Image (spheres, grey):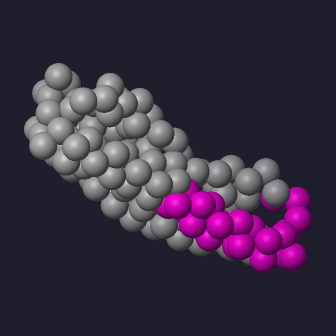
Amino acid sequence: METTALVMAYVGVALMVGLAGIASAVGTSICGQAAVGAMKKNNGAFGSYMILSALPGSQGLYGFVCFFMVQSFLQNPSMLQGAAVLGAGILVGIVNLAAAVFQGKVCANGIAAIGNGHDVMGKTLILAAFPELYAILTVAATFLISNIIR
């Protein structure tokens, strides 16, 4: 029974950190590809491209922050704690994966527009904040879950 709870907790943490990290890699790559294309037209806006390209990197950090919230449950967890960490891991992993990919697409479109000479940096940042909100909510949910199962 203890082994099952421990395995569930470690699988949860692997999903939490792993999927969120993959999410950031994919999201920033989507933006980076758009930035390379945009630099062909407007090399002077590299600062804007870099800022927008970095935004989807936050989801990987959220996965890591959530790991710190649940790490105390990785030694001798109860079944409830193991299941809760697994659930939090699935939640954080999947939501951050979607948020980073879709935020990357929003930012990539902003990068392309800036490359074409449009002044949309501020508006792109605002639109990119919407998928970010759901990633942040996973941090809040993990915080609440970790406090309930103590």
Q: Residue at x 78, y 77 (%)?
A: 37
Residue 148 or 95: which is nearer the viewer?
Answer: 148
Prevailing secondary structure class for the magenta stretch in the rendered image: helix
Any magenta on residue 31?
Answer: yes
Residue 122 location, x and y as percent? 59, 51
Q: Is residue 133 left or right of residue 28?
A: left
Q: Is residue 33 left or right of residue 123?
A: right
Residue 131, percent from left and from top: 40, 56
Q: Is residue 129 visible?
A: no
Position in image of residue 113 (x %, y %): 67, 71
Choose top left, top right, bottom left or bottom right for residue 26.
Answer: bottom right
Q: Kindly identify the residue that appears in the image at 73 percent across and 58 percent down.
A: 49
Query: Considering the image in quadrants, where does the C terminus appear?
Result: top left
Q: Is residue 26 left or right of residue 3?
A: right
Left or right side of 90 for 14: right
Residue 92 versus residue 50: which sits nearer the camera? 92
Above/below status of 59 relative to 110: above
Residue at point 65%, 67% (across, down): 29
Number of residue marks? 0
The residue depicted at 45 percent of the width and 48 percent of the height is 17
Q: Toward the viewer: 7 or 17?
A: 7
Quarter of the rendering occupied by the N terminus: top left
- Quadrant housing residue 137: top left
Q: Say which quarter of the image contains residue 146.
A: top left
Instruction: Assess whether residue 6 is covered by the magenta stretch.
Output: no
Residue 28 is at least partly visible in this image: yes
Q: Which residues are magenta?
A: 22-45
